[in-house]
Image: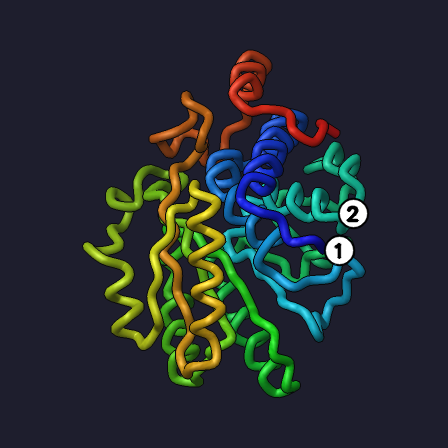
């Protein structure tokens, strides 16, 4: 796949955000807030950073692979995969519909290209990513494993076992990004279960390399992911703290947990779409 620049990726991100809103509105359910916030990251990953094949194989040999741990933001994942050519864009119309391959949380029994693990039971994705990264090492596969998790998800204890395991095993072909938007379904992460003053210092103490990234600055995402790739192979896993705004850039969706799992009505959809240019073409 052609490697796109920051301006081209931003154009795709706008279309992905339109897809997200229309998908969630179409079935009157889903998770738009975090999906909108992660559109720039997923678009950069698939259209610039990862070396991947749209001729999908589950084993992922000979290519970079990605695991979505916070599977409730499936709309952004599905749109990115479709826009990258994994399956027809028209299929986005079936999101959360009867007999669809595009379930509310990604699953594998529908055999949707691009999905290698069922996710959305929070706290499990990093463990899976550790296993995949170790498998690449055993197979002498030089490619990288990427994973995305949510900040509310970090309240699950299994994550911390995986963090310890990755550092102990020196899984240095693993790049984990946390969507640090400070919101979860019941309120802010600070109110529900505070993550402490500095999540980066926690992971550093566990033995990870740490990077920080602006999740809404495409060039910064490109540069940070390139830096992370250069840090691979040096004995430590890499953890990126990605600051985002839930619902970005739709003005009435930002700054609150309200849009974590609520679909926009007709008027709200029209308002939101008016703020996002149609760049490639709606499905």
Q: Residue at x 61, y 81 (%)?
A: 135
Q: Residue at x 25, y 45 (%)?
A: 190
Whether residue 101 is visible here, answered yes or no, is yes
Residue 110: horizontal and vertical position, in percent? 77, 53
Q: Residue at x 46, y 71 (%)?
A: 230
Q: Quadrant of the N terminus?
A: bottom right
Residue 261: horizontal and vertical position, in percent? 49, 34
Q: Which mark is residue 227?
A: none
| Colour mapping used in the image | rainbow
The residue sitting at the left extreme is 197
Q: Relative to the observer, which residue lies in front, 101 or 38?
A: 38
Which comes sooner in the sequence, label 2 or label 1? 2
Q: Relative to the observer, which residue lies in front, 16 or 6?
A: 6
Q: Does the CB distance between marks 2 and 1 fall below 8 Å?
A: yes
The residue labelled by disc 1 is 113
The residue labelled by disc 2 is 87
Residue 116: horizontal and vertical position, in percent? 67, 62
Whether residue 29 is visible here, answered yes or no, is no
Q: Would residue 148 appear left or right of 104 to someone viewing this image?
A: left
Q: Quadrant of the C terminus?
A: top right
- Under circle 2, the secondary element is loop
Total count of labels: 2
Q: Would residue 67 appear left or right of 159 to someone viewing this image?
A: right
Badge 1: few (under 14), some or many (20 or more) residues near its Cα, within 10 Å? Answer: some
Q: CA distance from mark 2 to mark 1?
A: 7 Å
Q: Would residue 150 appear left or right of 114 to someone viewing this image?
A: left
Q: Residue at x 49, y 53 (%)?
A: 222
């Amino acid at each position: 796949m052609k490697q796109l620049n920051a301006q081209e990726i931003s154009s795709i991100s706008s279309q992905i955000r339109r897809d997200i809103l229309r998908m969630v509105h179409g079935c009157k359910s889903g998770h738009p807030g975090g999906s909108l916030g992660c559109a720039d990251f997923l678009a950069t990953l698939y259209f610039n950073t990862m070396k991947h094949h749209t001729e999908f194989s589950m084993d992922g040999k000979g290519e970079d692979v990605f695991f979505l741990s916070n599977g409730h933001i499936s709309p952004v994942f599905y749109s990115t995969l479709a826009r990258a050519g994994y399956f027809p864009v028209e299929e986005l119309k079936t999101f959360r519909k009867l007999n669809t391959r595009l379930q509310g949380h990604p699953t594998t029994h529908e055999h949707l290209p691009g999905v290698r693990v069922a996710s959305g039971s929070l706290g499990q994705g990093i463990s899976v990513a550790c296993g995949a990264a170790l498998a690449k090492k055993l197979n002498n596969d030089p490619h990288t494993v990427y994973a995305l998790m949510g900040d509310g998800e970090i309240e699950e204890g299994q994550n911390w076992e995986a963090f310890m395991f990755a550092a102990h095993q020196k899984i240095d072909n693993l790049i984990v990004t946390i969507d640090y938007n400070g919101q979860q379904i019941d309120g802010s992460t600070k109110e529900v279960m505070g993550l402490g003053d500095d999540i980066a210092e926690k992971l550093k103490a566990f033995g990870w390399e740490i990077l920080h990234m602006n999740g809404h600055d495409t060039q910064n995402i490109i540069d940070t992911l390139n830096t992370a790739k250069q840090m691979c192979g040096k004995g430590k896993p890499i953890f990126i703290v990605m600051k985002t705004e839930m619902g970005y850039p739709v003005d009435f969706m930002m700054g609150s947990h309200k849009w974590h799992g609520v679909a926009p009505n007709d008027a709200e959809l029209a308002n939101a779409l008016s703020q996002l240019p149609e760049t490639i073409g709606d499905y």
